[in-house]
Each structure stands twice: as C-alpha cells, then as structure tokens.
Amino acid sequence: MTSEPGPPILAEDLLLLLFRPSSGPDGTAVVAGAQTLPYVLAGAVLTDLSIGEHVRTVPGWSGSTRVEAVTERPPADDLLRSTWDHLAARPRGVQATLAVIGPALRTPLVERLVARNDLRRSTRAASGTPSVELLTDDGSGRRAGLLRGVRDVLAGVAQPESRLAALTALLSGSGTLPQFHPEIPWTAAARARARHLEQGNWGADAAAEAVARSFAATMVSNVIFAAAVLRKQ
C-alpha cells in the first residue's frame, strides 16, 4: 500500500461497487460475490494493464493464449506493477496468471479504499468473543457515482467510456448484477446489454465461467482483448 494512493485502478472501483452498504448486520457492508472475488479482481487488473498497453497477448501452445509484459511500458501503480513484474519474467497463461494474482488482491485494495475515505474501518467485540473488523460506507459519494454510471450503461442512456464499460462487463460476468436490484433495475433490456458487453471481449465472460465451474480458477483469454477493442474505437 502506498501512503498517498494515485488515481483509482479498475480493481478498486470494482471492489468498491461489490461492497454493499447496509446489507450486513448492524448496517455494515458485505461484499457481493465473495467466493469468486479473487478471479474477478484479477480480471480487472489484467484489463487495466491491457487498456494501458502494459501487457499484450502472444500465441501459446496448441492455440492457447499467453500474456506478456510490454518491456518499455511498466505501469506506475504499484499493484499493477506487481502483476506486470510477474509477467515480465516470462509470458504466462491467462488462467495461471489469474490464479496466482487473484488471492492477494483484496487486502491491499481494501486498504486503498479506506485511505481514500470510500470505506470506513472499525472493530466491534462482544463479551467473550474476539474483535471483528467492520467495513462501512464512508459517505465519500464515489460508490454512488460509479453505481450511477453502471446504471446508465445498462439503461442505454449513453455510449460508455472504456473503463466504465469494462467495469460493467466485469460486474455482469461475476454474476452479481442481479443483487444490485433495485439500485440497478435488473430488466430484460439490462440483461441483454450486460451480456452484449461480456461478448464484446471485455473479459467478463471469464468471470462468469469461474462461477459456472464451482469457483474454479479459470478465465478465458478474452480478458486481455478488451483494451485492443477499445483502442480502435
């Protein structure tokens, strides 16, 4: 964690949205899709790296796809840099990369959200029990803004910019979007738009596949192609 976080990365925005304020006991926030969270956050990191042209895909054995770091373009953000360093050693399979980087992401991302005053950390203990860490919405308004952006995308209000479209697709692929109803109306039109984003190589299909395979560590290589599509738009 850095003492003065830079601009939020895509995985921070995704995690902030997945924390549902007032959905847990005593008004605390709980995270939606917690069991698949590592894979979805990892997909967001790879998508961010690809949008910034820090990584690219290369052919692997038997038609597979690997990811390699673009040597001359290391990212400035330390979390993104950690994944970039992992890929700089040698090209790696997408699924293997997600399985390695995903489990370590939640804690530093939460620290960033607390440092930005997007989440508030507190502790609570009952008699005879250990203290429990609680996370609640700190009222910064950033989550509300992101939520409004995703709602507008799914309502077809406007053509989304790249990061917001990727964020919406990752939420959809994680299988959590129906849990946001009625904040984000889960209508037939919204489902169709969400699926369209997933099929547009935003990387969300990979998250959906992780859910379908009993939370297995798998994401298809489309997670990387999102930025290539965006850069041509």
Image: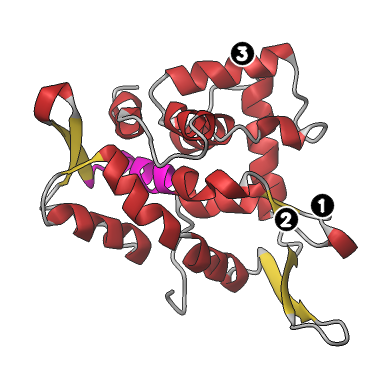
Q: Residue 40 carries which label?
A: none
Question: Camera-side residue: 17 or 140?
Answer: 17
Q: Which residue is drawn at 52% across and 55% down?
A: 12
Q: Is residue 78 left or right of residue 195?
A: left
Asked if the residue at tag 2 contacts the one at tag 1, i.e. Cβ–Cβ closer than 8 Å, the answer is: yes
Which residue is at 68% across, 65% downward? 119
Q: Does the magenta stretch mainly form a helix, a strand or a loop?
A: helix
Q: Position of residue 166 (x, y in %)?
A: 47, 34
Q: How crowded is mark 1: few (under 14 residues within 10 Å), some or many (20 or more)?
A: some
CA distance separating discs 3 and 2:
27 Å
Q: Tell me the mark number nearer the camera, choosing from 1 and 3.
A: 1
Judge whether residue 39 is colored magenta: no
Which amino acid, by three-letter code, is at mark 1?
A: Ser
**Considering the numbered disc 2 on the image, is that residue within a helix, a strand or a loop?**
strand
Magenta stretch: residue 50 in it? yes
On the image, the x and y values in percent for residue 200 come to 42, 19
User: What quarter of the picture does the N terminus occupy?
Assistant: bottom left
Q: How crowded is mark 2: few (under 14 residues within 10 Å), some or many (20 or more)?
A: some
Q: Mark 1 points at which residue?
A: 23
Which residue is labeled 3 in the image?
A: 192
Query: In the rendered view, does 89 fall on the left or right side of 233?
Result: left
Camera-nearest residue between 176 and 215: 215
